[in-house]
């Protein structure tokens, strides 16, 4: 069974496929094209949770019936929370959290679940997270999905207070996981840290280094997910 990887932009998609030589384009989906590379089908689905959810859902809905996806991975560059995830490091999500989905109240932010509907967290398969962390050196921890890139020390402190131990933020993970969940497929999130979450300093983003780290990480992740799709996934369904 194959693994669908959803990135935001083509530069991230190409960083993933580069681990296996050039990715060959396999199929068009509305608004994008899926590139095949090793065990991965890689799609640049757009930036933000809504684009990511739509692209993921379309790719899953149009997957060949005789070769469905066993896993969806949200991947790309991201902001790392200091000191847990420095620039150039990798982060793998133990929880994929919609950090700004909810309501602002006089008493502070209330997550959507506190409003009595929806959900704000998806849990990737524990054993897979552990094995990916071990193979790649990625720091495991909550990865936050935000619609607005954090740009101040105050907002960084707010996020860390609400999500102790958060290692990274990005803009797509929750959208990818929400779509995958509708298809009964587990999701993972893997981020290469291009910048530190905090006061905005766009010129300091090390995008090239992060993309190179992403390529290396996917080379090391391939055997792990191949083994997981063959063995652990089936064990899980047997329980
Ligand atoms: O300009 C380029 O060459 C380039 C190459 C690859 C990727 C980009 C992006 O701007 C990707 C946007 C994507 O990155 C995630 N991201 C990165 N840092 C943060 C952050 O601190 N907070 C939230 N998201 C971050 C995010 O997922 C964006 O969609 C440019």
Image: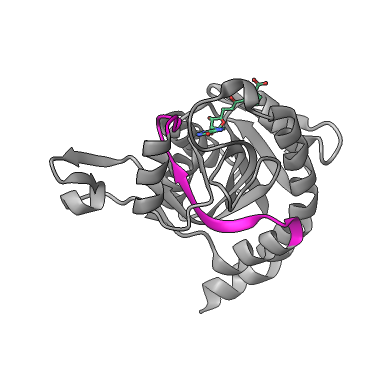
Viewer-side residue, 16 vs 234: 16
Question: Where does the magenta region start and end?
Answer: 135-152
User: In this image, 218 relative to 60: left or right?
Assistant: right
Residue 95 lies, with reference to residue 73, above or below; the image says below
Of the 4 image quadrants, the one containing the N terminus is bottom right
Considering depth in this image, is 112 or 142 the residue closer to the camera? 142
Identify the residue at image location x=84%, y=41%.
20
Q: Residue 136: percent from the left, percent from the top?
A: 74, 55
List x then y, in percent, for residue 153. 42, 36
What x and y, as percent, mark residue 72? 57, 48
Residue projecting furthest to the bottom:
239
On screen, residue 128 above or below 148:
below
- Which quadrant does ligand 1 occupy? top right
In the image, residue 146 lies in the stretch drawn in magenta:
yes
Residue sitting at x 36%, y 52%? 161
**Residue at x 44% of width, y 33% of height:** 150
Image location (x, y in percent) of residue 231: 68, 70
- Residue reaching furthest right? 21
Q: In which quarter of the image is residue 24?
A: top right
Q: Which residue is drawn at 69% across and 30% down?
A: 206
Check residue 171 for magenta coloring. no
Of 101 and 176, the residue lying toward us: 101
Way the structure is coloured: one colour
Asked whether residue 186 is in view, the answer is no
How many circles with numbers are drawn on the protein? 0
Q: Can residue 115 be seen in this view?
A: yes
């Amino acid at each position: 069974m194959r693994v669908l990887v959803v990135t935001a932009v083509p530069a991230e998609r190409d960083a993933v496929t580069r681990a296996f030589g050039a990715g060959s384009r396999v199929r068009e989906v509305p608004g994008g094209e899926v590139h095949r590379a090793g065990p991965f089908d890689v799609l640049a689905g757009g930036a933000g949770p809504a684009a990511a959810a739509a692209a993921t859902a379309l790719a899953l809905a149009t997957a060949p019936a005789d070769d469905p996806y066993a896993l969806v991975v949200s991947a790309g560059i991201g902001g790392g929370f200091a000191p847990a995830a420095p620039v150039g490091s990798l982060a793998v999500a133990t929880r994929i959290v919609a950090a700004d989905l909810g309501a602002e109240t006089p008493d502070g932010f209330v997550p959507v679940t506190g409003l009595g509907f929806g959900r704000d967290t998806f849990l990737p398969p524990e054993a897979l997270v552990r094995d990916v962390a071990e193979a790649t050196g990625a720091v495991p921890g909550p990865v936050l999905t935000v619609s607005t890139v954090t740009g101040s020390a105050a907002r960084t402190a707010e996020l860390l207070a609400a999500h102790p131990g958060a290692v990274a933020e990005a803009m797509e993970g929750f959208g990818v996981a929400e779509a995958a969940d509708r298809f009964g497929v587990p999701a993972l999130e893997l981020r290469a840290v291009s910048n530190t979450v905090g006061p905005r300093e766009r010129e300091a983003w090390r995008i090239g280094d992060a993309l190179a780290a992403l390529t290396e990480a996917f080379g090391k992740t391939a055997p792990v997910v191949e083994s997981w799709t063959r063995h652990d996934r089936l064990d899980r369904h047997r329980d």
